[in-house]
Structures are given as C-alpha cells and as structure tokens.
Image (cartoon, rainbow, N blue to C red):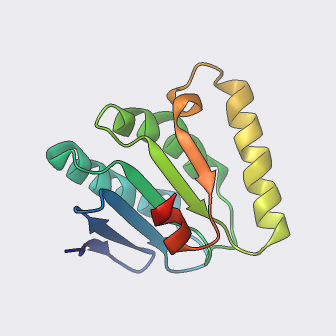
Amino acid sequence: MNFILLDNLFSVVEISPEEKYALVKAKGTYIPVEEFKRCFISLGDYIKENQNIEKLIFDKRNLNVFDQDSMVWYFVEWKAEMARYGLTIHRKLLPEDDVFQESVKLGREKLARENPDAAFHKLDIQYAKSIEEAVDH
C-alpha cells in the first residue's frame, strides 16, 4: 500500500514499497533550494533505512522555474549517495514548457562536462510523459 512520506507547501513524496518506487511531485511553480534539499534528504533517510526503493519518479510538470543549484546538488551528491542504497532508476516528467526543457537540457550538459566521473552517468535516467509511463518503464 502506498503512503505519503512528506507533504508540504512545495512538494509531496509518495512511497510505493510494493512496486519499489518513490514519487516526488512538485506542487507549485518553484521549489526553493533549501526546501528542495529538505524534501530529498527526507526521502534519502527513508531509502537508507528501508533500502526498498529502486526507482524515483520526479514529476516536475508544475514547475516553471529551473534552479541550477538544486540540480547540481541533486545529480552530483544526492543521486550518487542513493545509488549505493539501490536507487538507480530515475524517471522525470517535465512541464510542457520549451524554455524549461531547454534549461534542463543545457543544465545536464553542463553537469556532464564539469563532472565527467560522477555516478549519475551510470544511472538509468529517462523522461516520461505520465506517471503511469514512468512506473511501467
């Protein structure tokens, strides 16, 4: 049975222990970097304790502000640490916003250039159009 791990003004985190995934859904158009980190640190604490989450689905469709600092921390530090606990599959749902999507693309390219040996290069990171697609793939 799924349960809500965290629910605040900026995001909600749902855990599906049976299907071994966590869903992080942005509630608003922006998540301040400290709230972003608080959300993912809480999820990380759950993953470390239970070690039963293999997939993260990050639903960013409500966002309209891209934060590079959050992305750097998330990719370089958080994802590397979580991979050691079995979280190696990442699915992203992006907003239907060309500027946001281009910002993500450019941000990932910069991250890859500046961090050629980072753990995120070995992870299964893909984009999906719906939560159902993300769960199934």
User: Taking 13 as reference, is 113 left or right?
Assistant: right
Judging depth in this view, the residue of 22 and 30 nearest the camera is: 22
From the viewer's side, name the closer residue of 99 and 86: 86
Q: How many marks?
A: 0
Q: Residue at x 43, y 40 (%)?
A: 88
Q: Is residue 12 left or right of residue 130?
A: left
Left or right of 52 on screen, residue 77: right
Q: From this viewpoint, which residue is outermost toward the top?
A: 117
Does 12 appear above or below 127? below
Quadrant of residue 77 within the rendered picture: top left
**Residue 16 sits above or below residue 74 on the image:** below
Residue 29 vs 32, above or below: the answer is below
- Most extreme residue toward the front is 136
Q: Quadrant of the N terminus?
A: bottom left
Residue at figure coordinates x 21%, y 43% from the top left = 48
In the picture, residue 3 is in which quadrant?
Answer: bottom left
Q: In the image, residue 71 lies at what x, y percent?
A: 59, 48
Q: Is residue 61 left or right of residue 79?
A: right
* x, y percent for residue 72: 58, 41
Provide residue 123's location: percent of width, then percent of height.
52, 36
- Residue 86 is situated, as x and y percent measured from the top left of the image, at 32, 38
Residue plotted at (70% across, 26% down): 114
